[in-house]
Amino acid sequence: MKPLFLGGHPAVDFLNTFMVPRGTPIELIGDGRSLVVWLRAAGLLDPGAAHRLLRRLGVAELDAAAEEARRFREWTRDWLTRLQGSPAGAERSDLRLLNRLLEHEQVHRELVAAPGRPRVVERTRVEESGQVLALVAAQVARLVTGEDLARLKRCAGPDCTLWFLDRTKPGLRIYCSAAGCGNRAKVAAFRERRRAQGVGTRT
């Protein structure tokens, strides 16, 4: 299954690498290669860096990184749930765990040509397994420091487990996707109204 990018933020899309649609568990980062593929698709690794990483690290090391990423994902899901209940209640132990991952991040600045004048861009160096997870940890840190966690929601679809960041102005979005869960909810509501009116519907 292809990765889904409906969350509105890379950290939220990371949560959605595991889903249980209609009771069927789907794991999108089951091994190291699929983790690298997801990081590239999410825009956290450029194609060249992804290729070099696959060549530099062996299968066992990448698979171990994927296993750690899955544990971190579930920890993040639990932490965000707790933060939503008490936004100011981040435990020091939680911050220490996240900071230990962030310690592996290596970022350097590079001057690049641009219309008018050169500009500075940040490049993240990823050469070892610890730096792989730091990519995701950095996004989680940006989420909790730069976004309103009251807008972090779980899809209201009865068979959906996806999360999303509600960026609509009124903050009334309840489904991960209008075309997916939103449309299914409309169809179900229409059929329920027809049944209540005693009108048969085709299946």
Image (cartoon, rainbow, N blue to C red):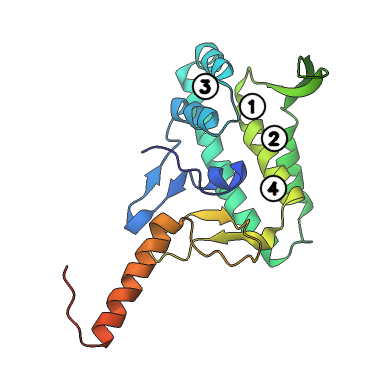
Q: Please indicate whether residue 190 sits to the left or right of residue 167 in the image.
A: left
Q: Earlier in the sequence, mark 1 or mark 4?
A: 1
Q: Please indicate whether residue 61 sits to the left or right of residue 107 in the image.
A: left
Q: Quadrant of residue 148?
A: bottom right
Q: In what element is the residue under mark 2?
A: helix
Q: Which residue is mark 2?
A: 101
**Which residue: 64% across, 20% down?**
126
> How many C-alpha atoms fall within 10 Å of the one at disc 4: few (<14), some, or many (≥20)?
some
Q: From mark 2 to mark 1, how far is it between C-alphas? A: 7 Å
Q: From mark 1 to mark 4, how far is it between C-alphas? A: 20 Å
Q: Is residue 108 above or below residue 8?
A: above
Q: Which mark is residue 61?
A: 3
In the image, residue 147 lies at what x, y percent?
A: 72, 52
Q: Quadrant of residue 151?
A: bottom right
Q: Which mark is residue 130?
A: 1
Q: Furthest-bottom residue in view? A: 197
> Which amino acid lies under the numbered mark 1 shown in the image of this protein?
Gly
In the image, residue 120 lies at what x, y percent?
A: 80, 22
**Which residue: 72% across, 50% down?**
144
Q: Which mark is residue 143?
A: 4
Q: In what element is the residue under mark 4?
A: helix
